[in-house]
Amino acid sequence: MKVKLRFSRSQLCIPYAAFLILFVIAPLLVIVYYAFTNGQGHFTFDNFINFFSNTNTIGTLLYSMLLAITATLICLIIAYPTAYILARSGFKKQHVLLLLFILPMWINFTLRITALKEVLSVIEGNISLHPFLNSVIGMTYDFLPFMILPLYTSFLKLDKSLLEAASDLGANKFFVFLNVTLPLSVPAIVSGITMVLLPSMTNYVVLDMLYNSTFIMGSLIGSYFSAKDWHNGSMISLILLIIIFIVTIVTNRFSDKDTDARRTVL
Amino acid sequence: MKKAFSCVWLGVVLLLTYIPILIIAVYSFTDASMVGGNIHGFSFENYANLFKNEELRAMIIGTVLLAIGSAFLATVLATLGAIGAHYSKRTPKLLLNTANQIPVVNADVVTGFSVCVLMIILLGIGKDTFVPLVIGHVVLCAPFVYLSIIPKLKQLDNNLYEAALDLGATPAQALFKVILPQLIPGILSGFMLAVTLSLDDYFITTYTKPSTFDTISTYVVNATRGSQTEVKTALWALSTVIFLIVVAVVIVMNVMSVKKSGRKTNEKVA
């Protein structure tokens, strides 16, 4: 007897939905559970209090925020003009040029940071003398393509007639940039910032490889993992999740505006 | 004047981007043991080590197999998921899109740690089975495959599917012969993205890998902690090889896309 397979197209998503529930949502619930229990499985706020009553961990939180914000700003300062020039200067073979800028993204980041470390050691002699500077350079080097890419796409989509209208109405070039180009690129700036900010708060390997022994939020998880302290590690993960959640909520407001605008245009 | 500034700016950024990679590439062909150290002569020793050293070879093959395997799994799951979600009602679609977004915005450290706590600590699945490692990598890759297929689904002409059914195709035939072929560009670019994500990953790998297994990332990080010069300089060679492969792939894909768009305009003219 031949069994005839009957399915509707929407049922095709069942395996993926099950996968997401099992391996994305369930792990997060487990993290929340572990964050509020101790080794004996009893409910406790100790891990939470451990984090917020300890000057070391609070210092780690502040240090990683400072590092991430600095690296993000420098990425933005470098990426904004780069993307603008790439998209609007009318170079021939524009997209080949863009590829040159984002190509390093596909080389393993640990190998790239190794190369950077070699160069920095030649320039600085002993690189452990400038831990903060080197970490900012490392993060910028690692994440710059992620800032260039969204900005480039947004400048490419920019409606030229808006710029012409502004200059026809008497705005000089600087005013056109300030009042038309810049506001229109805000969603891209925001998405670039989220691509750089969160990884630079957590990517502790970059710091390790550049001999910066100061902890950032990611290093805390790494050290709790080595110490097999799942409960405190889960608490740090939970705190990071909350930070990520807040950033996502804030940035979604900008990107929603963007899609709404697109919908009305269509 | 303005053009000159533009060129100088781009040139400086490019220079800063490529100086470390190129310096390493140059040094990988010499017998120097550190950058800035004495160069006595030209040598292929580092490249030979890359293939002779058992440990290095196993690590490279393992990394590539893991990347291709988990990218394949991720592509199958996410393609079916995206097709299903596209034809689902509003609420399940929204739920799936939201769940899919979690690993995208989440920090890799948190993703890796949470998968480790669930699978290894709570469920007690051994790291040596490679199951947590592969699942961790699929969690990392699949959402990006999903995101690269969704736009292609939105461009689909729904009438084609209906037409196939009217002409006597079963839903499965219509799916495989009408819908899937149109999604292939999205599926392929999703697969490529998945491979690169898996190759680049460090955090999920460290938290879920068997202790005897290393990918390029974990191996490099351990090597920088140690002081084996031979391994260090062999990694320069590895970095150069990867750089050349990436350049080659980019060139090939560019030539292919130029040819394709050329053919398209020809067809239009004809």
Image: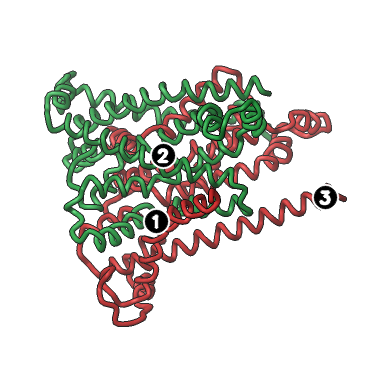
Q: Amino acid at mark 3?
A: Glu
Q: Residue A106, position in %: x, y?
A: 46, 52
Please give the name of the residue rendered at 44% of the width and 61% of the height, measured from the top-left corner: B242
- Dot 3 corresponds to which residue? B267
> Can you see residue B242?
yes
- Relative placement, left or right, of B174 versus A167 is right
Q: Residue B42, position in %: x, y?
A: 36, 81
Callout in the foreground (3, 2):
2
Q: Which chain is green?
A: A
- Dot 2 corresponds to which residue? A76
- Graded by Cα atoms within 10 Å as few (under 14), some (14 to 19) or many (20 or more), the crowding at tag 2 reads many
- Relative placement, left or right, of B25 versus A135 is right
| Discs 3 and 2 lie in a common subunit | no
Q: Amino acid at mark 1?
A: Leu
Whether label 3 touches label 2, CB < 8 Å? no
- Dot 1 corresponds to which residue? B16
Please give the name of the residue rendered at 33% of the width and 41% of the height, measured from the top-left corner: A71
Assign a secondary structure to mark 3.
helix
Whether label 3 touches label 1, CB < 8 Å? no
Q: Which chain is red?
A: B
| Residue nearer the viewer, A64 or B205 | A64
Chain designation of label 1: B
Q: Amino acid at mark 2?
A: Leu
Callout in the foreground (3, 1):
1
Going from the N terminus, do you reach mark 3 or mark 1 first? 1
